[in-house]
Amino acid sequence: MKENLNSMEESNNVIISDTAKIRVLIIEDDELVRALLDVIIADLGHHIVASVDNAVDALVAYSVHQPHVVISDIEIKGNIDGIELAKKLLQIRKCQLLFLTGNSNSDTFNRAKKLAPLAFISKPIVRVELERSIDLAVEHSNETIGFVTESMPVDGCLYTRIGNKLKKIAIADIEYIEVDGKYSSISVAQRLVNCKISLKELQAKLPQKDFVQVNRSSVINLNCIEDIDMARQMIKMPSAEISIGRNFKEALLNRLNLI
């Protein structure tokens, strides 16, 4: 149970041994229940990738972290319930699904069972029942987990959360990015889109052939350069001027087709 998560194979088809950690996503709007789940799952030696209370955060966490097991309450915050959310998750990729419920309504049960969950865990949660259900999920996760769609991000675009929506950003439209710690401002079509992501994380999502870092906190799209003032060490972009850091000048010039 104590094996390092980094030793697990991160591929589209993930095979897990009985002694390996599994990645677990918790979707529950009761803070006390979430805290209890956190404790039990941690005691079992598994890794909680996120613990959320609504569908939007769940969809983001599911896409980013690719959990093996989802433990979801049927009644959650927002316009869709845990059953409808689970349908959306399973359209992205397969996982082992455990439902939490305090509702014994037969219509709800019949809707949920169509998704073939491994277990229905009644509230209040009985620890031994939850542990056995998770053990069952681990056993089923030993089988190759197939994906309904490709798990790699869609080429050519990024998505960032704005309110309750995921905003699509075409990478080709990104002019420049300025970063302050873990927060970034992305200039797209003469406006700024703010998101919580570090420079290192963001650079990993951008095509290296098109983007280059020009100072400690700025990355530019090479295709958007209008001119470079070498005397002032400034790059003119369509909507801003970006300074060239001393330690980044050579790398920038090496990326340009000088004649």
Image (spheres, rainbow, N blue to C red):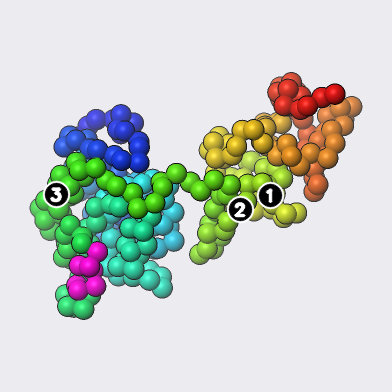
Please provide the residue range marked out in magenta: 109-115
* Left or right: 44 as drawn, with respect to 190: left
**SS for dot 3:** helix
The amino acid pointed to by label 2 is Ile
The amino acid pointed to by label 3 is Leu
User: Do labels 1 and 2 touch, CB within 8 Å?
Assistant: yes
Residue 136: numbered disc: 3
Residue in the picture at 16% in, 75% down? 104
**SS for dot 2:** strand
Residue 108: numbered disc: none
Q: Which image quarter: residue 228?
A: top right
* Left or right: 195 as drawn, with respect to 120: right
Residue 76 shows in the view: no
Measuring from the top left, give residue 243's x and y in whole percent: 78, 34
Picture mark count: 3
Q: Is residue 121 above or below residue 47?
A: below
Q: Mark 2 points at which residue?
A: 169
Q: Name the residue under label 1.
A: 173
Residue furthest out toward the right: 231
* Left or right: 60 as drawn, with respect to 40: right
Q: Looking at the image, is mark 3 or mark 1 earlier in the sequence?
A: 3
Measuring from the top left, give residue 253's x and y in whole percent: 76, 24
Mark 1, other Cα within 10 Å: few <14 / some 14–19 / many ≥20: some
**SS for dot 1:** helix
Instruction: Name the dominant secondary structure of the magenta segment.
Output: helix
